[in-house]
Image (spheres, grey):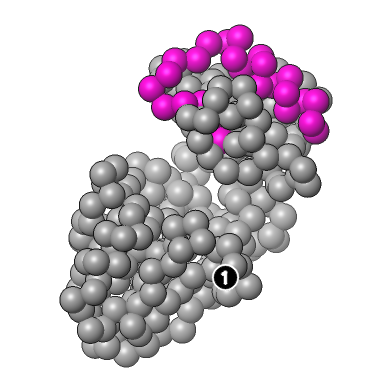
Amino acid sequence: MKVLLSSSAKSLRAALLPHASTATVEAEFGDVVVEGTIATLAHHGARAGNPCPCLCDSVPAERIDVFGISHVDLDTIGGVLGLLGRRPGPMSFWTLAAFIDVNGPHKVSEFGACPEDLARLYAWWAWSEAHRCLPPRDGSVTDVADYMMSAAEILAAIMSDDPGMLALGVEWCSKKEALNVSSFLERAGNVLVRVHVEFVNGLYIDPNGQAAKAVVAYNPAKGGVTISLADPVLGVSCVEIAQALWGPLAGGRAGIAGSPRGKRMCLDDLVKVRDALVTVL
């Protein structure tokens, strides 16, 4: 089995073309989707009404020669394994995974998951955070079948409530709670300001347990500033705010955006974008 990963729709489509039996899972690139000959699991943009790939039904495994994907996350992995009929664990876990994929990890407390599924989710997050699988930066195609099988084995262990894996999840939660405190600089209205070398734009709850609408974060190691929204806000676009302050090289989308790559920002930039977000919110 091959699982071809690429950040380029053109490259992925070309790599799949020689194969007669293909399936794509979240092979979405903006409004463009690369389709498979057997199955196309996509649920973003114009396809937002479709179910998450991780909830898919299986197809006869021998009918798929190659999978095509644009990124690797729990929903993508669940989709590939689901098509193969090898998706481990109860459907309640995958329903939780689908909710998180659509609404964001920061919404996990709103789902009402059972303690067992939450423990499994935290264990998965602990493993996946330490084992990233990213597409090549140049848009080329790479086969990540080995990673996919490793992920399947880890998920099987987690779904069997392996004590070691669940312990990693508990440790991961403790570290995230500590990161919430150590990265927190201030709260300005509905905006949390954070400074840390780790990614902290998913931390929308302040150390006092109060939710905010946005996070503005500065990474002192890379010199980058990232802004993000917990939920869509009508008339507010992170990328428009970023580009208004830092020019067209600032990138992102409505929900999250960052300063231009390779350009070192300073705390003054952090303050300016904080004030801009406070004003629009």
Above-or-below relation of 8 to 93: above
Q: Which residue is drawn at 26% across and 83% down?
A: 21
Q: Give the quarter of the image for residue 183.
A: top right
Per the image, is 270 magenta? yes
Residue 215 in view in this figure: no
Q: Give the quarter of the image for residue 97.
A: bottom right
Q: Foreground residue, 199 or 64? A: 64
Residue 217: where, in percent of width, then height? Answer: 58, 25
Query: What element does badge 1 sit on?
Result: helix
Residue span colored magenta: 257-281
Amino acid type, callout 1: Arg
Residue 71 in view in this figure: yes
Can you say which quadrant of the picture contains the N terminus?
bottom left
Q: Which residue is drawn at 23% across and 84% down?
A: 20
Few, some or many residues within 10 Å of mark 1 (<14, 14–19, 20+): few
Q: Give the quarter of the image for residue 8.
A: bottom left
Q: In this view, does 212 lie to the left or right of 12?
A: right
Q: Name the residue under label 1.
A: 47
Q: In this view, does 208 lie to the left or right of 4?
A: right
